[in-house]
Image (spheres, helix red, strand yellow):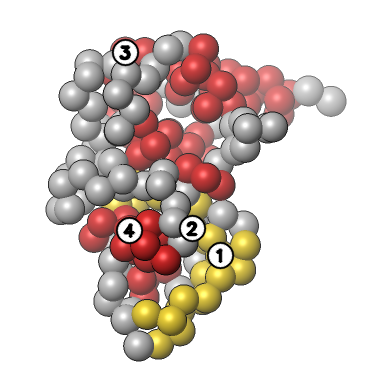
Amino acid sequence: MSTTRFRLNGVATEVDADPDRLLLDILRGQFGLIGPHFGCGAGECGACHVIVGDHAVTACDTPLWSVADKEVTTLEGLGSLERPHPLQRAFIAEQAMQCGYCVPGIMMSAAALLKQNPKPSETEVRHALDRNLCRCGSHNRIVRAVLRAAGELADDLAAP
């Protein structure tokens, strides 16, 4: 056991745990966060995506030691009920959710994309979400929602 320090959703955090323990286990088990979901356990489905730094990563196969001194953002850190992130508003407006199991991971992949590229093309959105599986068939609405959020973010940046 050792202490790992990182920022979780903007808050300085330290965890006493085996550094090889999986980030998903720490987020759900120790912090009680329910945004990142366990899907495949092999980093293939995207249900557990979180943002580490500026990149979406699979928390189910990311060891705790690899996030030391980094910023980790989960769905819970993306926005709030009082002030939802543009992606959250856009997903609601586009009715881009069905069962919702994959949506937190998809939102985190999309948020990482928009952090790196605030004006993505439809092709870039589809490519960024390629690692996220959705069995409900909401992909077209999800892509529209991400493009809508990108437009809203661009408008916010352009406003004086």
Q: As shown in the figure, which amino acid type bears the numbered disc 2?
A: Val
Residue drawn at x 42%, y 34% as measured from the top left: 107
Report the Cα–Cα distance between label 2 and label 4. Answer: 11 Å
Q: Is residue 22 left or right of residue 151?
A: left
Residue drawn at x 43%, y 81% as measured from the top left: 16
Mark number, residue 24: 4
| 50 to 18, vertically: above or below | above
Report the Cα–Cα distance between label 4 and label 1. Answer: 15 Å
Q: Is residue 116 left or right of residue 34?
A: right
Q: As shown in the figure, which amino acid type bears the numbered disc 3?
A: Asn
Q: As shown in the figure, which amino acid type bears the numbered disc 4?
A: Leu
Relative depth, front residue between 136 and 123 = 136
Closer to the chain start, of discs 2 and 4, is 4
Q: Residues within 10 Å of mark 3 (few under 14, many from 20)?
A: few
Mark number, residue 7: 1
Name the spot of residue 119 as percent of width and height, x first: 52, 26
Q: As shown in the figure, which amino acid type bears the numbered disc 1?
A: Arg
